[in-house]
Amino acid sequence: MNIITAFSNHNDTHQLCQDVIATLRKGSAQYDSEQFNILVVYFNVDHDVHLIHSALTEAFTCPVIMASSCQGAFAITPTGQHPTANLSVFGIIDPLGHYGVGYAKVNPASPDIAAQKAMQMAVSNSGRPYDAPSLVWTVMPPGQEEALIAGFSQIIGPNVPVFGGSSADNDVSGNWFQATCDVVAQDLVLVLVMHPSSALGYSYSSGYEPTEVNLVAQNCSARKIGLLNGQNAAHEYNAHTCGSISEALTGGVVLGNTTLHPLGRPIDSKMGITEYLLSHPDSVTAEGELCLFSTVAENQEFVLMKGSIEGLVKRAAVVAQNALDVLPEGRKPVGILMIYCAGCRLTIGDDVAAMQQAVLEQIGSIPVVAAYTFGEQGCFFDGKNRHGNLMISAVAFSQ
Amino acid sequence: MNNETEVLRENFALILRLKEQAEALRKESDMLLSGMRDILSAQTPEALYQNMFDVFASLIPYQTCFILAHETPGFMVCKTATDSRFLDTKWAVDDVLKRTLLGTPTAVFNARIQPAWQTLEHLTETTAAVLYCPFIDNNKTSIIVFCATEIGFYTQMHVATAERYREFTEQTLMSVQAKLEALQSQKLKKEREQVELSMVQSEKMASLGLLAAGVAHEINNPLAFVNSNFDALSGYMPSLAKFFAKTHCVLKSELPSEEKLLQIEALFNEYDIEMLMEDLQEISEDSKEGIERVCDIVKSLQAFTQDNDQDEAAVFDLNQCVADSLRLLKSKVKNTVSITQNLQKLPKLKGSAGKVNQVLVNLMVNALQAMDSSAQLQITTGHLDAPEIQQLHPDSECHTAGVTEQHAFVAIRDNGCGIAVDKLDSIFEPFFTTKPIGEGTGLGLYITYTLVQALGGEISVTSELNVGTEFTVTFPIPFTS
Ligand SMILES: Nc1ncnc2c1ncn2[C@@H]1O[C@H](COP(=O)(O)OP(=O)(O)O)[C@@H](O)[C@H]1O
Ligand SMILES: [Mg+2]
């Protein structure tokens, strides 16, 4: 198995694509002109999705999954890197492996049906229609990720790790895209089932630390919290976060204000280490309800988390390293596919370059592509697939 | 935020994870090793399979576990299963099974969609996820199948476990095979021993039946003349009684001594006492001989039926055995048969005389049955040294070890019909006979062969059609003698 990554930050969409296509071709030529099994593509919605789609699908015959990534996507190649390239591609060459792509339009009334359809399609396209996949990589439209994950497990069971992220635009205006060879749309769930010929390592984690503050959510509906510790949710949150959302207590977008103070759900692992699945408050309603990027159950107990720019900058390198560390001994890593929360990416701003530099220093010259997403799917040590916010994940491929 | 703490926590988590992996590995191998011990301690094939499945359960959890072996091209069949409903089910070799057979374990997330299960729908009620693991069994690839009720239960983690323990699994299965064979051959051996024992017994009974008539005759003859002797004896009794009564009267009378002597003298002559005494002497000697003959026959019969197998120290005198056997056969031997004996003095040999007698009787009966007119039976015993033995039994490996060992032999030679060359290989087989039903059982030589083996000896045969046959049995002479 070999991984070839390519990126371009050209302003001209045509040139952007040609750069990337050239790099990919050059890369695959190194390996006796082996074909790509799959291209995983992340791009900046400032560029026309249809132009990128047709350029890539004309240039390559292999399956493709594509998604928009918040303000560009991260790439490391053997010859260079960019933390927010307009187009970044992760190409897998694995003649002995099997990969299948499936997709379905998500009807908000029945997201699980879409997930099942997409999964069934991916499974039957994989050439291994009965085998349990090693891993599922997914792209989702933001909004109903938990139900989509549940839908996957209705087909292949709950034990196959699901990693990926919710597609993102640049300003949370809903301008995100998902695409495969066949379609380009804004409400697709994409599934890539992987049967790689060699081992994978993965890691899913946050860059935050728990505080002493515990908050119990009540009057919840879907992704809204009415009360925290019996008080108006917005007020209570504001009180514990040094007035981070004072300006929006009766309504407004708070995405940028809350990034360093997410709500964490403690997940106990059997090893005694508590991991935290994060929920990111994105807005406040006129009634002072707190809206999150993930579903909340009534009486959910939260721990208020705290983060720092420095922590988020250094964090990606640790997660990437963790994924490498769990590869079986003696396996040579050949590439890492990552997800980095768009909220974190916006919070660290220009430090995104330092974040990339930290990854590079940590793992050396292994090719990496990372997408900035509005929601992150992955699994912790306990093996359960989850949807969280402000998370970072990494899947390492090996030879 | 304190970054140091965060990194430390992460490192801690990683170390814990690696430690957990290492512990899991150690636990697995511990369980497997103790499982092996359990397997090898099984006493029945059923327990063996149960233990084997238990070992697999410690490796990979399952609801049902079974083994598929090759049957006809394109199909496999379930030969062993924890759930009897799977037994003897037939499996079409689909893509998944084929890949497994090519060497990679395969996890299927839902059996209900896999082609191989399509004809076994009733079994998918309790089966969703399936893990197939190949293993080499007698140079052929078979498959262990693990089934779970939950969709997607088996993951690549299980595939990796199966792969990691593949060699171990194969070894387990190999020891199961070996143990199974051992159990079966033990059982077979026991059964064979049982059959042999009863065959030896029944052949012995048959021989006894064959001999019974002759033996009765042998016993009858001396009994008859002992009887007539006693008739004669009782015939003499009245004269003897009168003689003694009259002698008594003479002795009691007042006659002078000379007169008494004269009268007794007269009585002695009158009753012919001298002749009577001679006759009595003769009768008692005769009767004694008759009784002794009966005793001998009874002893020979005892020698034939005695079973001192258990007696490690039992010894026999080969020449005595020849005499005993001949005595038992005497009545069977027609007057026209001339028997030549050429017996050399031999040391005592190890083994039960009963067995040796049975051997000799079998061989002699065969010889007698093979001859009709002008029959000549020749019995020879003597010593053989190593090279002679080598020449006699060239195929045998036994004597190469003790080249210097001395052997005793007995050869029974007849001038009967002989044995055709193509039959020569079969005569020691059980139930091989050329004789009509009622006369031959086909067991004689088979049992003879078995008995000779048990005695540590060897048997060989040379034969020429219509000229005659010679059977030679050799026994090692113990070093002590
Ligand atoms: N001395 C012999 N001469 C000729 N044939 C013999 C002799 N001994 C054995 N055989 C042949 O070997 C066969 C097997 O002998 P045996 O095992 O004693 O069984 P059975 O006497 O009941 O037939 C005989 O049927 C006969 O054909
Ligand atoms: Mg016979």
Image (cartoon, rainbow, N blue to C red):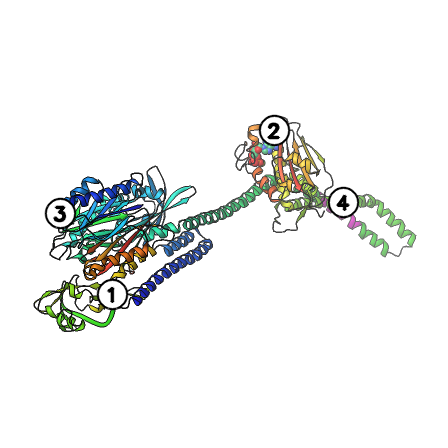
Protein chain holding label 4: B
Rendered location of residue B59, percent (x, y): 37, 55
Question: Do callouts 4 and 2 point to residues on the same chain?
Answer: yes
Name the quadrant of the N terminus of chain B: bottom left
Helix, strand, or loop for circle 2? loop
Which sits in the foreground, B62 or A174? A174
Mark 2 lies on residue: B418
Cα separation, mark 4 vs mark 1, equals 125 Å
Mark 4 lies on residue: B285
Helix, strand, or loop for circle 1? loop
Three-letter amino acid code at disc 2?
Gly
Residue drawn at (79%, 45%), measured in percent from left and top?
B281
Q: Is any atom of residue B368 visible in this view?
A: no
* Quadrant of the rendered image holding ligand 1: top right
Cα separation, mark 2 vs mark 1, equals 103 Å
Span of residues in magenta: B228-242
Q: Main secondary structure of the magenta part?
A: helix
Q: Label 2 CB, ligand 1: below 8 Å?
A: yes
Rendered location of residue B333, percent (x, y): 65, 34
Q: Is any atom of residue B52 visible in this view?
A: yes
Cα separation, mark 3 vs mark 1, equals 35 Å
Protein chain holding label 3: A
Mark 1 lies on residue: A208
Three-letter amino acid code at disc 4?
Glu
Protein chain holding label 1: A
Mark 3 lies on residue: A48
Rendered location of residue A368, percent (x, y): 27, 51
Depth check, mark 3 against mark 2: the one in front is 3
Three-letter amino acid code at disc 1?
Tyr
Residue drawn at (34%, 56%), measured in percent from left and top?
A325
